Every structure is written in structure tokens, then in C-alpha cells.
């Protein structure tokens, strides 16, 4: 596959980590957090990256793998996730993720339970406010709201606890043109949404931070290994979008599992050992998907058959076989 775009797609795993997930580009993440996530405070001077993989209390507990997890110099915890496609129980997943940076603050011995603030940030390549469970009177009045900030409140609408915040950016709702960009907040959202379609840095984005972002995102400057990694990440992103978006358009996403916590194949494969997958993934209209997945994994490990032959043997699609292959790195 030949990548034709000049700049990377930030909604790919590789692209997001390239821009925001390294010490070299830490200033990009800090500016994004200050201007988009905490625009009223702009108080983050530095961050430290933490391991993106977190385990539960016991070995049997489910693990969570974040796109980016960092702690500010003031102790605030930030989970930042790029969400590529719709999935069931999206809000449940956000709450589940937020529990890990809360639990890790526990101290052994005597402890007064004082916690540092936790922020769970979702940058969404889809709109969730139109879903039935979020289709409230408020969202009907303002269906194109881009930024959602959620905290625990009491029955009178007063904030009960201000140290746990969920922030969601519905990127499809951001419709400003370059000429309409006024604030740094606007410019960040414009870059995230339009970066892979641009051929040069827009005149409105001449600040130093965006100069560095565009230099970092230029595919021609990647090493051969980086280009290969990005092409694979881009293929997974496009396959995922095509499969899930098509399934939602056809009304076939009921019952599809929340998916592994990492984001690479959210909502597609629960895994060999966990639960039953109900619903449909591109023609998978019936049967036990996990059993079929297990058989496909065994066939791929043997390496004797092509994806087309495996798809024919197990009465599935080539796309589904390729998704399993990518998911388990076979």
C-alpha cells in the first residue's frame, strides 16, 4: 500500500503516538492539554509519561491499555484516547478506564484517601450524542456541540466531586473553516480533523507549536521502518472504519462487544478466552464468532493457507481473516 497523503492521520495508532506519545514531542501534548482540555486554567508546565498498560487488582482482573497516560507536574492524571469508531458501552469503558489512575493513588498503610484530579479524554472520530442513550433534550437543542465536559453532580445540578472529569471531543461536529479559526482551541481541533487532507501548513496556523506539529507529521521525513509501521496502522484504521461504519449504517451493531481496551481493533474481537460475541461483523450473521476466530488463528499459525483459502474454509470474509491476523500479529 502506498500512502499518498503528505501528513499522517492522527487517528491511527502510530500517528497519535508519533505526535503526542514521545518525550521528543511532549510540548505538543502539553499545549494540547492546556488549550483544549484545561483552557480556563492553562496550568500544565510539564508531564511525565506513565506506562499505558494497567492491570487490575489480581491476575484474573481485566487489564486496560491506554493510548496515552501521563501525570502533570501538579499531580493531575490524564488518560488521552483516540476513538476511531462507534462501539457499544462507550461510556462504560470511559468509567472503567478512569478507575485505574484512581486506584493507583492508594498508599499502603495509613492513608487519608486524598486523591489527585483524574481526566479521561476521548477524541472521537464519530458522534455519540445522536445515540439513543444520549439523545436528551439538551443534545437535541444543541446537536452540534463539540466539547463535552462531564463531572459528578447532585440532584440540584451542583458539582459533587470536581476531581473526576470526562472530556469528549466529537470531531465530526467541528465544522469551522480555516478562515473562521480564532482561538488556539479552534486551531487544534482543525488540525486534528484535517491534518491528513492538507498539503501544507495553513497560514492561520503559523504558531511555533503548529510548525513543530507539521514537521513531525510529514510522512516523507519518516524512516523506512516508520513508514512501514504507519502504513500498517493506516490500513487497520481504514479497515476498522469501513467495517464498523458499514455495520452501523445497516443497523447491525447491536450486541457487538466492547472490544479489547487498546483501540487498535476496538469493538471487533473480544478474544479467544472471553465471552461470546453477539451481532454481526461484515456478513458474520450467525454462529459463535469466538470459536471461528480461534479456528482462524490456528490456521494462520500453521501458515499453509492464504487468507482467501481460510475465509473459504470457515465460511467468512477475507476482511475478517485479515482483522484477526492484524489483531494477533500473526
Image (cartoon, rainbow, N blue to C red):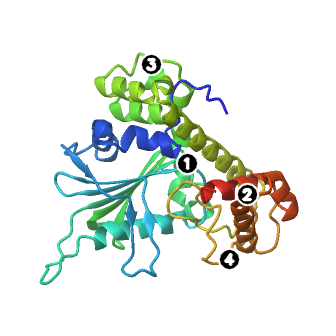
Looking at the image, residue 252 lies above or below residue 68: below
Residue tagged by mark 2? Answer: 303
Residue tagged by mark 3? Answer: 202
Q: In terms of sequence position, does the residue under pointer 1 or pointer 3 come before the other?
A: 1
Q: How far apart are the alpha carbons under marks 1 and 3?
A: 28 Å
Q: Where the N terminus falls, by quadrant?
A: top right
Q: How far apart are the alpha carbons under marks 3 and 2?
A: 48 Å
Looking at the image, residue 267 lies above or below residue 60: above
What x and y, as percent, mark residue 175? 53, 33
Question: Is residue 171 found left or right of 315 in the rendered image?
Answer: left
Residue 276, disc: 4
Q: Nearer the viewer, mark 4 or mark 2?
A: 2
Most extreme residue toward the top is 203
What x and y, as percent, mark residue 324? 68, 59
Do the numbered discs 3 and 2 sit on residues whose CB atoms are within 8 Å?
no
Q: Where the C terminus falls, by quadrant?
A: bottom right
Looking at the image, residue 12 lies above or below residue 206: below
Determine whether the residue tagged by mark 1 lies in a helix, strand or loop. Answer: loop
Determine whether the residue tagged by mark 4 lies in a helix, strand or loop. Answer: loop
Residue 143, disc: 1
Do the numbered discs 2 and 1 sit on residues whose CB atoms are within 8 Å?
no
Q: Quadrant of residue 133?
A: bottom right
Q: Residues within 10 Å of mark 2 (few under 14, many from 20)?
A: few
Q: How far apart are the alpha carbons under marks 4 and 2?
A: 26 Å
Q: Nearer the viewer, mark 3 or mark 2?
A: 2
Q: Which of marks 3 and 4 is in front?
A: 4
Question: Is residue 242 found left or right of 49 in the rendered image?
Answer: right
Determine whether the residue tagged by mark 3 lies in a helix, strand or loop. Answer: loop
Q: How far apart are the alpha carbons under marks 3 and 4?
A: 48 Å
Q: Which of marks 1 and 3 is in front?
A: 3
Q: In terms of sequence position, does the residue under pointer 4 or pointer 1 come before the other?
A: 1
Amino acid at each position: 500500500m502506498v500512502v499518498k497523503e503528505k501528513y499522517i492521520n492522527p487517528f491511527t495508532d502510530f500517528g497519535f503516538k508519533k505526535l503526542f506519545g514521545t518525550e521528543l514531542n511532549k510540548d505538543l501534548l502539553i499545549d494540547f492539554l492546556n488549550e483544549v482540555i484545561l483552557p480556563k486554567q492553562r496550568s500544565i508546565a510539564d508531564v511525565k509519561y506513565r506506562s499505558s498498560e494497567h492491570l487490575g487488582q489480581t491476575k484474573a482482573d481485566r487489564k486496560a491499555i491506554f493510548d496515552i497516560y501521563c501525570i502533570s507536574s501538579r499531580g493531575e492524571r490524564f488518560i488521552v484516547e483516540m476513538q476511531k469508531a462507534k462501539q457499544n458501552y462507550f461510556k462504560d469503558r470511559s468509567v472503567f478506564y478512569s478507575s485505574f489512575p484512581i486506584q493507583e493513588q492508594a498508599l499502603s498503610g495509613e492513608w487519608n484517601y486524598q486523591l489527585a484530579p483524574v481526566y479521561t479524554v476521548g477524541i472521537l472520530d464519530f458522534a455519540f450524542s445522536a445515540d439513543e442513550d444520549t439523545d436528551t433534550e439538551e443534545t437535541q437543542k444543541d446537536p452540534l456541540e463539540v466539547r463535552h465536559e462531564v463531572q459528578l453532580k447532585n440532584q440540584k445540578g451542583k458539582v459533587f466531586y470536581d476531581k473526576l472529569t470526562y472530556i469528549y471531543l466529537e470531531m465530526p461536529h467541528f465544522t469551522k473553516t480555516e478562515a473562521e479559526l480564532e482561538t488556539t482551541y479552534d486551531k487544534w481541533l482543525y488540525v486534528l480533523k484535517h491534518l491528513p487532507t492538507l498539503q501544507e501548513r495553513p497560514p492561520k496556523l503559523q504558531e511555533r507549536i503548529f510548525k513543530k506539529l507539521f514537521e513531525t507529521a510529514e510522512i516523507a521525513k519518516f524512516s523506512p521502518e516508520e513508514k512501514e509501521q504507519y502504513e500498517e496502522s493506516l490500513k487497520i484504521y481504514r479497515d476498522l472504519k469501513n467495517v464498523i461504519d458499514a455495520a452501523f449504517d445497516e443497523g447491525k451493531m447491536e450486541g457487538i462487544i466492547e472490544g479489547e481496551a487498546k483501540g487498535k481493533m476496538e469493538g471487533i474481537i473480544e478474544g479467544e478466552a472471553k465471552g461470546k460475541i453477539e451481532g454481526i461483523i461484515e456478513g458474520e450473521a450467525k454462529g459463535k464468532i469466538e470459536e471461528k476466530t480461534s479456528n482462524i488463528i490456528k490456521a494462520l499459525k500453521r501458515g499453509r493457507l492464504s487468507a482467501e483459502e481460510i475465509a473459504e474454509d470457515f465460511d467468512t470474509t477475507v476482511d475478517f481473516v485479515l482483522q484477526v491476523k492484524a489483531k494477533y500479529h500473526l
